[in-house]
Image (cartoon, rainbow, N blue to C red):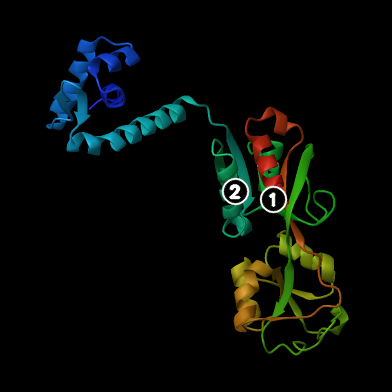
Amino acid sequence: MELRQLRTFEAVVEHRTVTEAATALGLAPSTVSEQIRTLESSLGTPLFARNPRGMTLTAAGRRLLPWAARLREQAEQARRDVTTEHPTVRLGALETLAATHLPPLLAELADHHPELRIDLRIGPVRDTLLAELAARTLDAALLLDTAGPLGELGFPVPPAPLDHLDLQDVPLALVAAPGHPRRHATALHPADLPPDTRLLVGDPACSFALAAHRHFGPHLERLRTGGIAVTRACAERGLGIALLPEFAVHDQLADGALTRLDLAHPPAPLRLRLVWRHGEDAARPGLREVLYGLSSRI
């Protein structure tokens, strides 16, 4: 069963005679007849009933008709996919954001720009993403920062012309074990915390550790933990307090495994920030579509 035979089959169905189908296709009537006979032979069943008034579909022919349209459309889609150049954008993202923030962003891009191909690269370290942007081995990167210039949160920025776009806020929560002595207090100031309070932090360069340092300064004792999951578990066990993104502690706050400490001056939310090299949006195929696609969410 060949695509040209299916096209001829559809033409005979439409025009009802071999002669008229041949005229529409620009073929000799003998060629049309031969293709129909070959198709019927390959399927092992007649597709048309021949009569003086023309050709009418048999039951098998009626079953083939929707398949013929479907198969030819799929073949055309395959042809377009193979012959069309699809721009690929190399997008880096912090591991922290991979499960929670990337899927909706990628789904929205797929809906609005199905021709784009995203080469996703997940990294645990912000500095590596920024270095790859500067070296042009990444086209864009998603990371966390605070309001203001790039790096205002307190991390170094490479000497490269980088632009950024803030996509959404990432709220923070100061959490502690349910039995924390200040759990019922309101409008807490850092000085109101017990003197032996320990602040649980992961890597000092991680976004949440930098946010905690900006908010509390150097005065609280630090207890190095690890990633978000470890830090959260240590807070649940009463080993200290932790400043973590709300998306990471929502369930624990809801079921009482953690409690939120009410601060007089809550920490400013972080910003989910898309970063790219200045001017690359015009030079790199597909990057402009990514920037426009994500900026439409704001």
Q: In this view of the protein, which residue sits in the foreground, 24 or 171?
A: 24
Q: Is residue 19 left or right of residue 135?
A: left
Residue 97, quarter of picture = bottom right
Q: Is residue 190 above or below residue 157?
A: below
Q: Tell whether label 2 touches label 1 (CB within 8 Å).
A: yes
Q: Counting residues from the N terminus, which is met first, the one under dot 1 or under dot 2?
A: 2
Q: In this view, does 239 lie above or below 126?
A: below
Q: Is residue 149 left or right of residue 87?
A: right
Residue 146: x %, y % from top left? 79, 57
State the quadrant of the N terminus. Answer: top left
Image coordinates for residue 227, horizontal then vertical, percent:
62, 65
Q: Position of residue 2 (x, y in %)?
A: 26, 25
Q: Mark 1 points at which residue?
A: 297
Among all residues in the image, which is located at the extreme front? 53
The answer to whether residue 226 is visible is no
Left or right of 33 on screen, residue 133: right
Q: Does residue 172 appear in this view? A: yes
Q: Mark 2 points at which residue?
A: 108
Element type where label 1 sits in the image: loop
Tell me which amino acid carries mark 1. Answer: Arg
Q: Residue 176 carries which label?
A: none
For residue 88, side relative to residue 275 (left or right): left
Who is closer to the viewer here, 143 or 75? Answer: 75
Residue at figure coordinates x 73%, y 68% from the top left: 172
Residue at image position (63%, 36%) is: 137
Q: Nearer the viewer, residue 76 or 126?
A: 76
Residue at the spot x=17%, y=22% of the render?
38
Kind of residue at badge 2:
Glu
* Residue, far top: 28
- Numbered disc 2: secondary structure: helix
Q: Where is residue 57 in the image (x, y as percent from the top left)?
A: 21, 32
